Image (cartoon, helix red, strand yellow):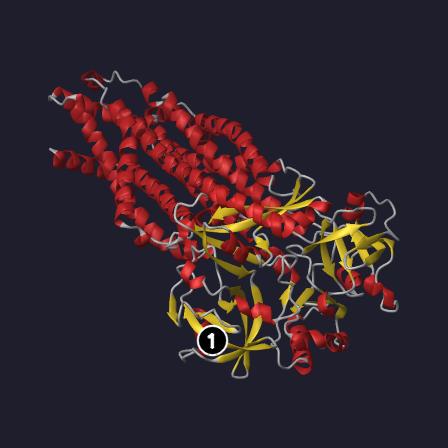
Amino acid sequence: MLSNYLKVAFRNLLKHRIYSAITIIGFAIGLAAVILIVLYVRFELSFDDFQVHGDTIVRASFASKKEGTIQGRGPAFTPPFAPAAANEIPEVKSFVRLSTPRIANVFVRGESSKLENIRHADSAFFEVFSFKLIAGDARTALKNPYSLVLTQTSAQRLFGEGNAMGTLVKLDDKGPYQITGIVADPPANSSIQFSSLISFSTLYEDKNLYLDWNGGNQYIAYLQLVPNADIAGVEKQCSTLLWRHLNQQLSSIGVEIVPSLEPLKNVHLFHEYDSETRRSNIAIFSAVAMFVLILACVNFVNLTTARAIRRAKEVGIRKTFGANRNDLVFQFLGEALLVAVAGTLIAMLLVELVTPWYRVLVGEQAGSLSSFGLGETALFVLSVFTVGIAAGSYPALHLSRFQPAALQGTISRGAARSIVRNTLVVFQFAVSITLIASTLLVGAQLQYMQGKDLGFQRENMIVIPLRGDEAKERVDILKQELAALPDITGITTSSEVPSAGFTSNGYFPEGQTTPVMIHVVDADEQFFDTYGLSVIKGRSFSSERKTDKDTYLINESLASMLGWGDPVGKTIRRGGDHTVIGVVRDFHYATLHDKIEPLIITNKPWRDRYSVLSVRTNSKDIPELVTGLRAVWQRVIPSTPFEFSFLDDELNTLYRTERRFEELFFSFSMLAIVIALMGLVGLASFSAEQRTKEIGIRKVLGASTQGVVSLLSRDFIKLIAAANLLAWPTAYLFSQRWLEDFAYRMEMPWGVFVLAGGGVLLLGLFVIGVQAIKAASANPVESLRYE
């Protein structure tokens, strides 16, 4: 019986090839979109699942509270917290501290290479975390000072196929470090990433580092708790611990450090700086993929019900020969299942074809169909079966209602023009227009950010990192020789460059007894001219005034926050009193997600050494200029490799997540409009077919081709216009919500809505027009013979 249903369904699909192709291909595109998004979401939800002890590991995070107000929160803190927690809190079984990522030049057999994402780690690292150690002893690999563990990729890059174990290397001008282990690369779905690990005990060998409770906040603490530990209870004990070691002292100035514990498996989606964006992307892309699939199902429902008149005679004949309604329901559901199966096979092929492009877009973590397990595969098959049944249910129930009277033509043409079908067409195009308008709005904001005046010179700025003692010690000679090159219009050294933000420290502004966390950058006298910063009050630093080494400049935001109408002459205390000699106009030293915050500019870097050199140029031949820069560098600092980047490129990478979002959104928007237009092709073709005799009569009576096209297009234009009325407010609300993440955003470009709606309308007119012209060009005599 089942085989008969499928056989008849297969014959019917072949008989109506155009409609079948539209339905199957549309379903395949929708399903492929869902599969790609499922792979992406699946990866995002899998972070740190590979950690064997993941359920018992928490990351410590700390909020700075001043007079009851939270001023900042993050996991970076001072080193003593983790060992103190292990000693004083019974529920803490072990701990691992990781430094924030570092970059260094590694010297192997006289040759140097840059090594990024270096982290210091405690000796318990491989016992607490489940990273696979390929070579070395997990208990001792990170025990002794100057021990270095390389990832497999780093080891192969530095040593090729040779054995790296036991080799001595130098990092910048420090070492030697002994390679004591090789670890497999961290999985892509690990919230902890590194290229190499240095024993944490190495930090204590550097007497210039602050590693006590008042030390630099550069270390992240992971605590392994005993099984079934009460995290809330441990947090309270952490608060008590901090009171004894730190907060009791800070209470006199109204400051408190509030600890919290974050389960490791929640870190990626809930506790990183971009976690909210990741969660939004998961929700948005999941919704978009489902809408694309729904649009494909809508095509099936629309085209099937539109052809109800054609199927009415078939239903009448089958009922005349004894078929009951259940038989017909099964028949039409069989067709729906065939569409689902065929669409699934094509969808799988599409996924395999676009996977390379998809991985470039979202990263290697995109995964593939082969990564699905047995349970996931079964769930996928069941989902496809369910979608097929759901899509075919309405047409099956609708068509199986027809009575044998259909043979006598009692099914009117009005039944084919159902309110349901028109509603679904409006829904299809409303979704498509919403997606396109939203994509254009996202692109407009990104264009706004790229073109916005940041308050400093960003174009033609080359950034050169100063790594190692030699580079930092000889930077003055380097600057002199670089200044002699042609087309160099400015050279400056600083602790950081304006891009992702500056570090912050606690300061005591004049008249205040409690410290204020303020961003700070150390810069030389040429910083303001090279970056085109405007000093609007007072003056900038001068090399002729030796006392300027102990003075500050501040930005407008800090002056406003402190209520200083004339800040010049005021003092700010940190390691002594520092006089404010000028105010610089606000500039965006962080991303446009954040408002411009208070800033101090000093003329005295930590340990009297700057970390980066910036070169401004007006050269039209950048490759030649870079060659000149490299030659000077290699002459002055021969032992350190030359590296450079363009500030513009660094700034653009800050919005990589947003650009990836735009590209994905655009891709799925195009899929939506393709599916909607495919459905429109089918409906327009069917509408022309249904009105063949009417068109023939009108042509005989003198109607023009233009008049016939207008006749056939009128109803569809109304539906697309109605879709615009629904889409525009939806796209507006979405864009407003998305733009909330930006402190600085564009004015709403209302023309985007007209462009999206008008573009879809023109595409629709083109699709309808092609079908209408084809019908209008037919021989009227043949049209009047049409049965």
Indicate whether 363 appears above or below 38: below
Left/right placement of residue 556 relative to residue 626 reads: right
- What x and y, as percent, mark residue 502? 68, 56
Q: Quadrant of the N terminus?
A: top left
Indicate whether 757 appears above or below 346: above
Asked whether residue 273 appears in the rendered view, the answer is no
Q: Quadrant of the C terminus?
A: top left
Left/right placement of residue 779 relative to residue 653 reads: left
Left/right placement of residue 383 relative to residue 519 reads: left
The image quadrant of residue 786 is top left
Asked whether residue 603 appears in the rendered view, the answer is yes
Could you say which is closer to the camera, residue 723 or residue 48? 48
Residue denoted by label 1: 179
- What x and y, as percent, mark residue 410? 25, 15
Q: What's under tag 1, amino acid-wise?
A: Ile
The image quadrant of residue 342 is top left
Total of numbered circles in the picture? 1
Tag 1: Cα neighbours inside 10 Å, few (<14), some, or many (≥20)?
Answer: many
Left/right placement of residue 38 relative to residue 380 reads: right
The image quadrant of residue 185 is bottom left
- At 80% from the left and 59% from the top, the residue drawn is 576
- What x and y, as percent, mark residue 97? 52, 59
Could you say which is closer to the camera, residue 440 or residue 45? 45
Could you say which is closer to the camera, residue 138 or residue 89? 89
Could you say which is closer to the camera, residue 7 or residue 194? 194
Secondary structure under the numbered disc 1 in the rendered image: strand
- What x and y, as percent, mark residue 183? 41, 68
